Image: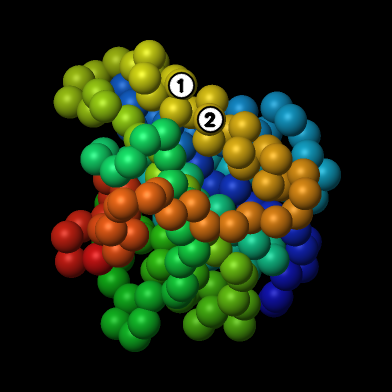
């Protein structure tokens, strides 16, 4: 099963009940409203192994999550499937593990990106984004809309930032 639907899948993930952690699903809502042809949108609290089947059906996958400490307003990096020894738990799955499962189970290797939107408030309960996170979301949505409409998603490497350190809230220190 490879690229049955073609085009792009955006998966926004995070917990909207934990303030800025909801940036990924918020981006998914914004992009879905645009109804861009060839762009499919999904959102959830976390990535699940079932996302591999959906990823395998697309040419390009963008995983969007809140970023806990990276550059503002957002960053975008190309990612590859995890190597051998993919691990996951029932709690969460790394985007690279999703890609590895798509490759290993379905023979698909979609082009993939991880988009991290800088958030600031994660240590409370409640829905809603901080004012600064809202501004970062708007910048990310505008950039992604333009990229999707012209059919060219490219990395954004913030100047002066160690790109190897870019990660989202779901990645551990061991994932770098």
Is 110 rendered above or below residue 113? Answer: below
Residue furthest right in the image: 37
Mark 1 secondary-structure assignment: helix
Could you tell me which residue is drawn at 20 percent across and 57 percent down? 172
Image position, residue 115 (x, y; %)? 47, 48
Count of marks, rendered view: 2
Quarter of the image where the N terminus is located: bottom right
* 85 vs 35, nearest the viewer: 35
Residue 121 location, quadrant: top left
* 146 vs 40, nearest the viewer: 146
Mark 2 secondary-structure assignment: helix
- Tell me if I can see residue 15 in this picture: no
Residue furthest front in the image: 160
**Residue denoted by label 1:** 135
Is 120 rendered above or below residue 111? Answer: above
Disc 2 from disc 1: Cα separation: 6 Å
Residue 143 location, quadrant: top right
Is 69 rendered above or below residue 107? Answer: above
* 176 vs 82, nearest the viewer: 176
Apparent side of residue 90 relative to residue 52 in the rendered image (left or right):
left
- Tell me if I can see residue 59 in this picture: yes
Image position, residue 159 (x, y; %)? 38, 50
Q: Are marks 2 and 1 in contact (CB under 8 Å)?
A: yes
**Residue denoted by label 2:** 139
Apparent side of residue 77 relative to residue 162 in the rendered image (left or right):
right
């Amino acid at each position: 099963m490879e690229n049955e639907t073609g085009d792009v899948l955006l998966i926004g993930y995070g917990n909207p009940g934990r303030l800025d952690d909801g940036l990924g699903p918020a981006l998914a809502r914004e992009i879905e409203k645009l109804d861009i042809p060839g762009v499919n949108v999904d959102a959830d609290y976390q990535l699940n192994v079932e996302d591999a089947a959906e990823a395998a059906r697309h040419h390009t996958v963008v995983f969007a999550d809140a970023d806990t400490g990276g550059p503002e307003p957002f960053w975008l990096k190309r990612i590859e499937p995890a190597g051998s020894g993919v691990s996951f738990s029932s709690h969460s799955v790394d985007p690279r593990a999703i890609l590895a499962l798509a490759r290993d189970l379905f023979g698909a290797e979609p082009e993939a990106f991880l988009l991290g939107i800088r958030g600031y408030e994660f240590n409370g309960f409640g829905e809603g984004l901080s004012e600064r996170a809202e501004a970062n979301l708007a910048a990310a949505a505008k950039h992604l809309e333009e990229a999707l409409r012209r059919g060219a998603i490219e990395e954004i490497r913030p100047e002066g930032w160690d790109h190897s350190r870019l990660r989202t809230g779901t990645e551990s220190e061991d994932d770098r």
